[in-house]
Amino acid sequence: MPRKPLARIFRGTPRNLSFLAARLRAGELVAVPTETVYGLAADALNARACRKIFSAKGRPTTDPLIVHIARLADLAGIAVPNAAAFTLAEAFWPGPLTIILPKNPAVPDLVSAGLPSVAVRMPAHPLFRRLLRLAARPLAAPSANLFGYISPTTAAHVKAGLGRKIRHILDGGPAGIGLESTIIDLRDPAHPRLLRPGSITRAALSKALGRPVSSPRRRRAATTSAQVSPGQLARHYSPRTPLVLHRRLTLAKVAGGAADEAWLFIAKPAGRPAKNVFWLDTRGDLRGAGRRLFAQLRRLDGAGYCRIHAETASGDGPAEAINDRLRRAAAR
Ligand code: TXA
Ligand code: MG
């Protein structure tokens, strides 16, 4: 069998955007930049197009997709919004927040993995927004990685994983946030529940809603049952290299380790760190650390180390999202 051609990376010129919008309308897949991570997009109202997302990623159809919209006026075509959803949309859209609401029957069951609810987000990335408007339909898009691997934050990451499974990648530069959107369940607006921590923190959501938002339940065992709690697979975002987490790393710990192990600090350690020492943000700023986490994990995963030691972030707020991704990446 001849090998499939490699995907082409498109710059966001007006001509390319019109071309890619036409591909989406024709039911094809396009990988798109977002402010969080790159997504693999298809027409959300076309079940055949969405099926291609699952096969390209190797994603089980029990794991539902997020539907992306360009304008608030499009929300009611996807979901059954409530006042709490409008409050959060007003405060955080366009941006890295996904809201779970009762599903509008127009959305194919495949998109929601048969659930009566649907995940909706209005992204902030200017190129993705232009593409959404040109395509003139909602776009379903999970992260553009092979199922279970680290989410992509550059067009090159998408090409490395899905290069022979898709044909079109829109390049919007490195993702500004670098961690997937915060997911909040607003099916019952009196009891908002955080399903996935992200750069919009639980505290910010509680403040906007004027009521507490309950924490995600931590799951031990991996599950693929959509009915239990989608998006909460314990093992996810995983490098192939074994990953070990530490509450605090020190250069003394590094000195006690082997040379073929990598050490990933949150902040640059003082002194002259060895070649196998890495960090996420020079000053330990957690927004910067979140932005670089996935790219660093990929780099270290490809560098031939036998083990990666990573330091977890301390505090709450942005630390919650970083630690959530680290824990899932380390789960075996
Ligand atoms: O930042 C993001 O959210 C990125 C970009 C591309 O927008 N997308 C993303 O998609 O991270 P994905 O598929 O990798 O993660 C979406 C999560 C899944 O874990 C899925 O289980 C959950 O959202 N989800 C989707 N629909 C749901 C629903 N109806 N109820 C509960 N969880 C849902
Ligand atoms: Mg994903």
Image: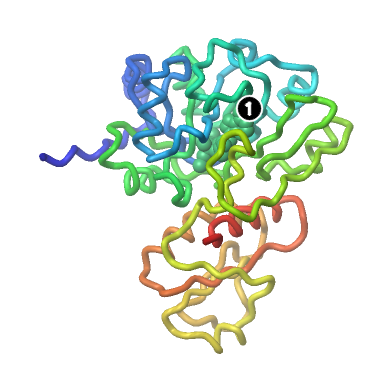
- Compared to residue 256, the image places residue 196 above or below, namely above
Q: x, y (%) of residue 161?
A: 34, 47
Judge left or right: residue 289 versus residue 29: right
Judge left or right: residue 80 versus residue 290: right
Q: Residue at x 39, y 31 (%)?
A: 53
* Residue identifier under label 1: 94
* Structural crowding at the residue carrying mark 1, measured as other residues with C-alpha within 10 Å and reported as few (<14), some (14–19) or many (≥20): some
Image quadrant in which you'd find residue 70: top right
Q: Residue furthest right?
A: 210
Quadrant of image for the N terminus: top left
Question: Do we see residue 34 in this rendering?
Answer: no
Residue placed most toward the observer, 15 or 226: 226
Question: Do we see residue 279 in this rendering?
Answer: yes
Q: Kindly identify the amino acid type of the residue bearing the numbered disc 1.
A: Pro
Residue placed most toward the observer, 16 or 64: 64
Image quadrant in which you'd find residue 213: top right
Q: Residue at x 44, y 84 (%)?
A: 259
Q: x, y (%) of residue 127?
A: 47, 28
